[in-house]
Every structure is written in C-alpha cells, then in structure tokens.
Image (cartoon, rainbow, N blue to C red):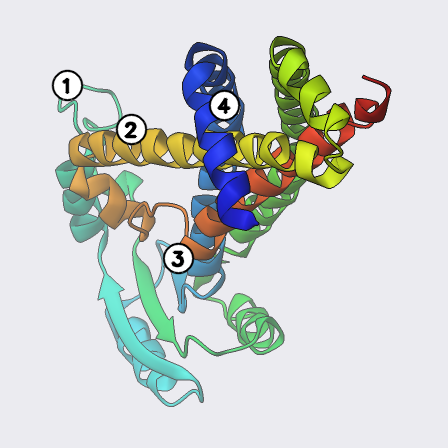
Amino acid sequence: MFSNTTRRAQRGMRREWRLHALSIFSLTVAFVCLGAALLVLTNLRALEERWSHAGRASIYLKDTAKEDDVDAFKSTLTMVQGVTAVHYVSSGEARQQFGEQELDAKSELAALPAEAFPASIEVEVRPDMTDTELADIVGKLRQLPAVEDVETYQAWTERLARLVRGGVAASALLALVVFAAVLAVIGSTIRLALQRRRMEVEVLKLVGATDGFVKGPFILEGSVQGLLGAVGAIGLLGLLFFLVRGRLDSELAALIGVDPSFLPWPVALGMAGLGALLGALAATASLRKLVAI
C-alpha cells in the first residue's frame, strides 16, 4: 500500500515538477530565516555559558598601593579557598597588552601613557564556584584599602542572559510566522496540484477508491516538500556559515572565548522533521473537501 502511494506521489511530483520546485524554494527561504535565528541563538547561548563560568576576576589596585602591599595581597589571595591562580599585572604590562590588541596604533587610546592603565591582580577561581561564593569573596576584597574596584564580568553575563531571552522570544515569534508561511505555501501548492489532477481523482472516486487512497499521494507530496525545504535551508545555512567562519579572525574567537558553532544535529534534525510534519498537516488540511470533488 505504501509503495503504491509512493509511486503515485513520485509520478505526480515529476509531472508537476515546476510547481513543486517553486514551492520548495519558497519553503527554503522561510526555513533559512528560522534557521538563521536559531543559529544566532545557539552561539549566544554558548557565549553566555562560557562567560557565566569565566572563573576569573580582576582586582584593580589604587595608585597608592606599594610593592610590599601587593606581594602580601597576592600571598593572601593564594590561600583563599577556591582561588586557583593569582597573577599581578603592572600598569606597564597592561599598557603593553592593550597596545598589542589595538589595531590602530595612531588612535588616541593607543597614545595613552602607562599611568592611564591601572595595575591589577588577575585571580582565577574554580569554574564550578557559585555566584554566591564569588560575590562573598568580591565583597570582602572591595573593603581592602588598596583595592580600587573588582570586576567579575557578572554584569556582562547578565546582559548576555537578557539578550538570549530576547532572542528566544524573537525566535518563537519568527517560528510562528514561518509555520504560517509553510502551511500557506504547501496548502496552496497541493490545492493547485489537486485541481490539475481533477480528472484522475474523479476516475479513482468512480471506481470506488477510498478517500485515504486518493489523499495519500498528495499528503506524501506535501511532507516531501516540507522536508526538502528544511533540508535545503540547513544546507544553505551550513555553506554560508563555513564561508563566513573561514574569514573570521581567529583572534576575535580567542577574545570572546568561544568558537562559532553550527546548529547542533538535534536542532537540524528537528527542523527537517518539523518541515515534513508541517507539510503533511498542510496537505491534509487542503484536502478536507476532497469528497465533494
């Protein structure tokens, strides 16, 4: 039964290949929009995860801090539970590191003297340290007289979290638009294909064919259209992603701490399966008046 339905669907798609090709192209465009949103969201989540477990803090010292105070401060920090490494960065070293990262050597920032860059102590902590534990350590460090400020990058993480939540909401809205577009495109295509095969359908009904027998090929065609549209979108996104990634500066990836990644395979398979399911649903809905033909 299924093989017969498959052969009839293949014959119908070959006969109306221009119609189905246009439908698949339209579906690919729709799924590219959804896939691009999911791709951005995937990398934002990875960036949020990376910075939420940065495992480091920068302690900026006052200009009045003496060398003996810094050495004692470093020794004390190494004994704090949860601290794994301590590294002192002088004003000169901070100025040199900034100069290496600054692309335009003639810019005003690059011309700043070493005194403009505060000395700091870079502290690495356990990656599994909770926010409460880190906040407790930071609160105690800020009370020390030699400390100007402490940066834990938590504010950056919170901004990323808000951006991810906004991305999720936008992706959900975009998904609804894409679903509506898929249902409309496939529904219109199947109805047009049905009209073009009206004579064939009428003959099948006259000889006693059931509704399921007549509808089967059309539903399969709709499912294939949705599947091919989603797969085409994933393939196009993959091509564009690797082209852009090849031109991405490796230093930028090292700076943010995350290499751009493509859609995880469960998401890609989910898109393909969703396309097939939406195609079958759209075809079924478009054939609800078949009995009246």
Q: Nearer the viewer, mark 3 or mark 2?
A: 2
Per the image, the residue denoted by label 2 is 240
Per the image, the residue denoted by label 1 is 106
Residue type, mark 1 in image = Lys
Label 1 CA crowd tier, 10 Å (few <14, some 14–19, many 20+): few
**166 relative to 103 in the view: left or right:** right
Residue 42: percent from the left, percent from the top? 47, 47
Considering the image in quadrants, where does the C terminus appear?
Answer: top right
**289 relative to 71 in the view: left or right:** right
- Depth check, front residue: 32 or 136: 32
Disc marking residue 60: 3
Secondary structure under tag 1 reads: loop
Q: Nearer the viewer, mark 1 or mark 3?
A: 1
Q: Which residue is drawn at 17% across and 46% down?
A: 97
Residue 179: percent from the left, percent from the top? 66, 30
Q: Nearer the viewer, mark 2 or mark 1?
A: 2
Label 3 CA crowd tier, 10 Å (few <14, some 14–19, many 20+): many
Q: Nearer the viewer, mark 4 or mark 2?
A: 4
Quadrant position of residue 292: top right
Q: Residue at x 67, y 10 (%)?
A: 195
Q: Residue at x 51, y 42 (%)?
A: 4
**16 relative to 201 in the view: left or right:** left
